[in-house]
Image (cartoon, grey):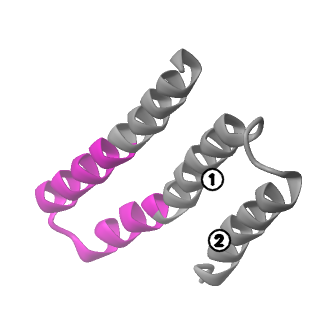
């Protein structure tokens, strides 16, 4: 059970870091006050978001790996891939 708690903590930590980056970027946009700069910051966030999603999903899948069948693990992995493909610009 201790391993599961550690995986959940790591997943939550990644989400906290991602949220902090989002808030910092929003404050930076407001302070700089230029549309072009705000768009560049937003583009960077657009790159970071999918990386965080992938990292959190991989941690979760690693935590489940010993408890669910390979078929179900593959289905979840394909689902994450489809989310990333569907949100491409």
User: Is residue 48 positioned above or below 4 on the image?
Assistant: below
- Number of disc labels: 2
The residue to which callout 2 is attached is 84
Q: In this image, 18 relative to 8: left or right?
A: left
Depth check, front residue: 83 or 87: 83
Give the quarter of the image for residue 66.
top right
| Discs 1, 2 touching: Cβ within 8 Å | yes
Q: Which residues are magenta?
A: 18-45
Depth check, front residue: 3 or 40: 3
Any mark on residue 9, and which?
A: none
Q: Residue at x 56, y 45 (%)?
A: 56
User: Is 37 a magenta residue?
Assistant: yes
Q: Position of residue 20 (x, y in %)?
A: 28, 42
The residue to which callout 1 is attached is 54
Q: Position of residue 70 (x, y in %)?
A: 87, 52
Q: Locate the N terminus and report the quarter of the image it occupies.
A: top right
Q: In this image, 58 relative to 78: left or right?
A: left
Q: Residue at x 47, y 25 (%)?
A: 5
Q: In this image, 47 relative to 34: left or right?
A: right
User: Is residue 75 positioned above or below 35 on the image?
Assistant: above
Element under disc 2: helix
Q: In this image, 49 relative to 35: left or right?
A: right
Q: Earlier in the sequence, mark 1 or mark 2?
A: 1
Element under disc 1: helix
User: Is residue 74 positioned above or below 64 on the image?
Assistant: below
Q: Position of residue 83 (x, y in %)?
A: 62, 74
User: Is residue 48 positioned above or below 67 on the image?
Assistant: below
Q: Main secondary structure of the magenta part?
A: helix
């Amino acid at each position: 059970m201790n391993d599961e708690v550690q995986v959940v903590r790591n997943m939550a930590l990644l989400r906290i870091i991602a949220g902090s980056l989002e808030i910092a970027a929003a404050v930076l946009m407001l302070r700089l006050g230029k549309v072009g700069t705000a768009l560049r910051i937003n583009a960077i966030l657009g790159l970071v978001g999918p990386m965080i999603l992938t990292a959190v999903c991989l941690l979760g899948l690693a935590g489940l790996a010993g408890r669910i069948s390979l078929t179900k693990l593959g289905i979840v992995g394909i689902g994450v891939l489809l989310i990333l493909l569907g949100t491409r610009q």
